Image (cartoon, coloured by chain):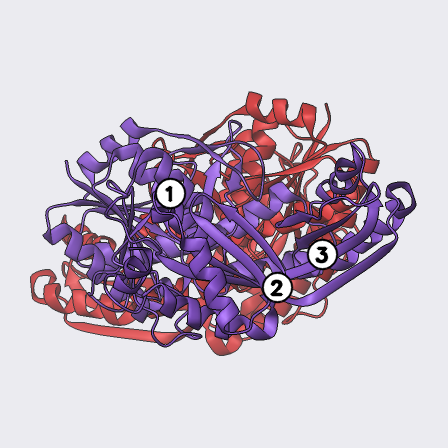
Chain colours: A purple, B red
Amino acid sequence: MRILVQKFGGTSVDGHECMLKVREKVLGGLDNGYKVIVVLSAMHGVTNSLLETAHSWTEQPDRAELDVLVATGEQQSVALFTMLLKEIGIKARSCLGYQLPIRTDPTYGSARILDIDQNAIFDLLKRYDVLVVAGFQGCDCTRRITTLGRGGSDTSAVALAAAVNASVCEIYTDVDGVYTTDPNICSKARKIDTIDYEEMLEMASMGAKVLQIRSVEFAKKYNVPIHVRSTFSNEPGTIVTQEENSMEAALVSGIAYDKDQARITLVGVKDEPGVSARIFEPIAAANIVVDMIVQNPSKDNRTDLTFTVPRGSVRDTLAIIDRIKDEIGAQDIFHDDNVCKISVIGVGMRTHAGIASIAFATLKKENINILMISTSEIKISCLVKEKYTELAIRSLHEAFGLDKEKSPACEQSLA
Amino acid sequence: MRILVQKFGGTSVDGHECMLKVREKVLGGLDNGYKVIVVLSAMHGVTNSLLETAHSWTEQPDRAELDVLVATGEQQSVALFTMLLKEIGIKARSCLGYQLPIRTDPTYGSARILDIDQNAIFDLLKRYDVLVVAGFQGCDCTRRITTLGRGGSDTSAVALAAAVNASVCEIYTDVDGVYTTDPNICSKARKIDTIDYEEMLEMASMGAKVLQIRSVEFAKKYNVPIHVRSTFSNEPGTIVTQEENSMEAALVSGIAYDKDQARITLVGVKDEPGVSARIFEPIAAANIVVDMIVQNPSKDNRTDLTFTVPRGSVRDTLAIIDRIKDEIGAQDIFHDDNVCKISVIGVGMRTHAGIASIAFATLKKENINILMISTSEIKISCLVKEKYTELAIRSLHEAFGLDKEKSPACEQSLA
């Protein structure tokens, strides 16, 4: 049994006309000899509208009941879409999270999938050609409804693809694939044909919001190939997969950016064991995600500590710092909202040196000052003044030859 | 464990303000020492709007998927209402049909309840003080969602009350009880304190649309007392129960009417065995409900046959008659839409003669011609010209003393 998983997001199921396009995609899968598992999100705007109602009725809606409420969005999508399939004689049925079941932990609102009953799905696929599954939802061990958190339908789709060992998990969306960078900023941005899971993770977490991060982690873990493509065209999109031979991989796959960054500097804090923990523990406890951290070399047993947090968390972070500033001996506290993180991403970095120096040289040539640097095996991130965002992206995009199919400029530089 | 079941219809859960009133009712139940099972309908208009969407998308929506779709209405109600309970610290949770479970047959759209897991509910009631149950829905043996048909939430409530042997099943609505007749027609209509199941069945089927007929049948079968009352007041409403001592019962409990009637007369059909079957079988096969039937005495082996059908079915009925008119030898066919059925209802009729003659005399006194008569143990129905509807109701209401607490006028007449 060859199985294809197809996932359609909110803008792809937004009304009758859109759903007819979705039906075409499903028919295409059937024509190619697949059994099809279709995973649907709620129609555009439905989830938000339900959340708004709940929050206007009660200040802190019960998490478990919120899941019962928002799960209705996907339930409506799958019911309506299955009607459209049955209308033309296709053997199909809708499946809600508890019906398959997709079992999760009981973390309402951001549950994690524990397991999916593979045999139950195979049994259903013997009787039906298409299963229309409500994305984003599962059930805990007491059969209460859980949801997987924003974008959770991607994770549903990948988890189902992993469970049934599907040939591919197609994620349909309103863009036609993953780009080397934001096409709105860089007109030379190019659609990427193939990208490695880890690169995709970095791209996704950097704000290239095509796929939910957790779904990519899931796909990586179970080695499920993802095909990100457009509901509104027949062109192939971007395949997210395991890069088999990283020697032949592009050195750099893309340039991502994240404007939701603010920099906080603590001047002259005591340089003694435990000070960092004293600072970052209460920040973590307040659920504030610290991204980059740089500690300057110590001088007179004092050091400057700079880190970044999401812009919306600046006020809360400063309040926490204020409470501990005497204890840690901070002499001064600065913060700056007008910064942006630019990241150069590529699995090729693992086997090639010199990517960082090209990035730094490129920014220097444009007179862009680098405020902070952090690196990983496959990523170099530089914090710059926000006003340089577009310039930095365009010049890095060109420097690494991302506007061309291969990247000769880059390989030349390294030769 | 003393258990109270409270059911609230669509107009009672129509928005935040309404639901706060519902919460007051639930708190009242808790204050009186009950564990409370709250059964909710979808918010006013939600079910219709979902049905409209489905029917605008596809001509004949799949029945099973339609149930998946409309069940979201109740799901949203219970989630939102449970949030309001938890907000003030009440131990509550929502329960969907499949979670209890309420098991039904797989007749999507009009499923019948097979059984309810009593022990599962008792287990839940040990952990929660209030269970908020989605009305109108259940699940079949394959765990697919079913719905019980229009007004099914009443049936859900009564079935739950029967399953847990609840003290009473309160049905909250936007009227304050069952009336002796339609107060819009007869200003002297009086709220009935207690009414027998069978009387209520006749009242309900006659168009006093306070309770779904099936819920009353269910209540009668399991002897569940129903208290029909208003969400928007604290006054007691009408208790629907088994009349213990019908000798003391009111002779007549109410006057119902049904304008959705049309009369069809077949003149001079052959009076031979099998003719009636030949006429009424194809009508029944077309799902047309025939109500009253009168056959005149035969003359020259021919007879006139008159019967009533709902007005919307007149055209279809006439088309059927047309196909068989030669075979049955009908010499002429008349039909009349401008009729109304007036019914005098009371379990007291079982033990008292003379009710019918008072009814006939009353109509005669007002010069209202009776077109057809049909009677049961507890009901006398007369078909009259529609224009006499109001006059007939008011005069019968007065003749049977329904405007007074007891009915001395009537007993006098019978003395």
Which residue does the numbered mark 3 point to in the structure image? A313
Tell me the kind of residue under disc 3.
Ser
Q: Nearer the viewer, mark 2 or mark 3?
A: 3
Could you tell me residue B383's position as x and y percent?
A: 44, 65
Crowd around label 3: few <14 · some 14–19 · many ≥20 (10 Å): some
Kindly report the distance in space between the C-alpha atoms of the residues bearing marks 3 and 1. 33 Å
Is there one chain holding both mark 2 and mark 1? no
Mark 1 is on which residue type?
Answer: Arg
Write down the quadrant of residue B282 in the picture.
bottom left
Which percent across, then down, holds residue B415?
69, 48
Local crowd at mark 2 within 10 Å, few (<14), some, or many (≥20)?
Answer: many
Q: Is residue B196 above or below residue B315?
A: above
Front-lying residue, A244 or A16: A244
Checking the image for residue B396, the label placed there is 2
Left or right of B182: which side holds A180? left
- The residues tagged by marks 2 and 1 sit, at their Cα atoms, a distance apart of 95 Å
**Secondary structure type for disc 1:** helix
Residue B414 visible in image: no
Q: Position of residue A78 (x, y in %)?
A: 36, 52
> Earlier along the polypeptide chain: callout 3 or callout 1?
3
Whether label 2 touches label 1, CB < 8 Å: no
In this rendering, the answer to whether A365 lies above or below A110 is below
Amino acid at circle 2? Leu
Between label 3 and label 1, give the one nearer the viewer. 1
View extreme (right): residue: A326
Residue annotated with mark 1: A350
User: Is residue B191 or residue A95 the one in the foreground?
Assistant: A95
Indicate the secondary structure of the residue bearing disc 3: helix
Q: Residue at x 11, y 66 (%)?
A: B323
